[in-house]
Image (tube, rainbow, N blue to C red):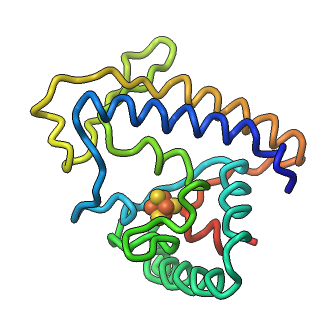
Amino acid sequence: MAESTFSEIINLYREMDHAWDSIAQTYSFACTGCEDNCCQSLFYHHTHIERAFLLDGFHRLDPEKQKQIRRNAKAYCDQTFASGNTTQSFRLICPVNEAGRCLLYPYRPMICRLHGLPHEVRRPGSEPVKGPGCDAGRFDEKKYTPFDRTAFYREMAQIEMAFRQQNRLNQKVKLTVAQIILSE
Ligand code: SF4
């Protein structure tokens, strides 16, 4: 796909990364990996644009690396979903994580970027929904630095809507990274 297809999501991801870094600094928090590795979480991704962008990055990898990741993704899906399970995490490492390093780091989805810090999401007419942040940051011992994800979610929804219209996509998406890799 043309680079311009992804210019808006690249800008949005840049804003997310910048916000995350600034807020992490207020806690003197740096993610250096931990036993509770978030790349072992059962994360679902819900947008066609993020699927397309991740696959765009995947196709830029060396063909042998792509083959290896496809094998990892197949093993991940066989173990996670074989019995019809869709909710229980077996703490399997994401198929694009190699020795603790994300091979698709510039292309990783929104939840991989926003994870870790305490945050809130606001919906009209409701109290903010708050998330606690990861255990590694020990955020319960620290004063909360406001991190409102709402504008990011809203902007992602707008980018997704435009992408769906351009590509005549109607069906909903709910896919792990492993399923995205195998979804072509
Ligand atoms: S895409 Fe990258 S950052 Fe996200 S879970 Fe997989 S390895 Fe981790």
On the picture, is 91 further left or further right than 107?
Answer: left
Where is residue 87 shown, x and y percent of the image? 41, 61
Q: Residue furthest left?
A: 141
Picture mark count: 0
Which quadrant: the C terminus? bottom right
Residue nearest the observer in this picture, 50 or 56: 56
Task: Tell me if residue 129 comes above or below residue 156 in the rendering.
Answer: above
Task: Tell me if residue 12 comes above or below residue 31 in the rendering.
Answer: above
Q: Could you tell me which residue is drawn at 51 percent across and 35 percent down?
A: 16
Which image quarter: residue 68?
bottom right
Which image quarter: residue 89?
bottom left
Q: Could you tell me which residue is drawn at 33 percent across and 70 percent down?
A: 91
On the picture, is 166 further left or further right than 170?
Answer: right
Q: Could you tell me which residue is drawn at 9 percent across and 33 percent down?
A: 141
Where is residue 8 shown, x and y percent of the image? 73, 36
Q: Could you tell me which residue is drawn at 72 percent across and 30 percent down?
A: 158
Residue nearest the observer in this picture, 59 or 177: 59
On the picture, is 149 further left or further right than 138?
Answer: right
Where is residue 71 shown, x and y percent of the image? 57, 87
Where is residue 86 shown, x and y percent of the image? 47, 65
Which quadrant: the N terminus? bottom right
Which image quarter: residue 183?
bottom right
On the picture, is 116 further left or further right than 112?
Answer: left
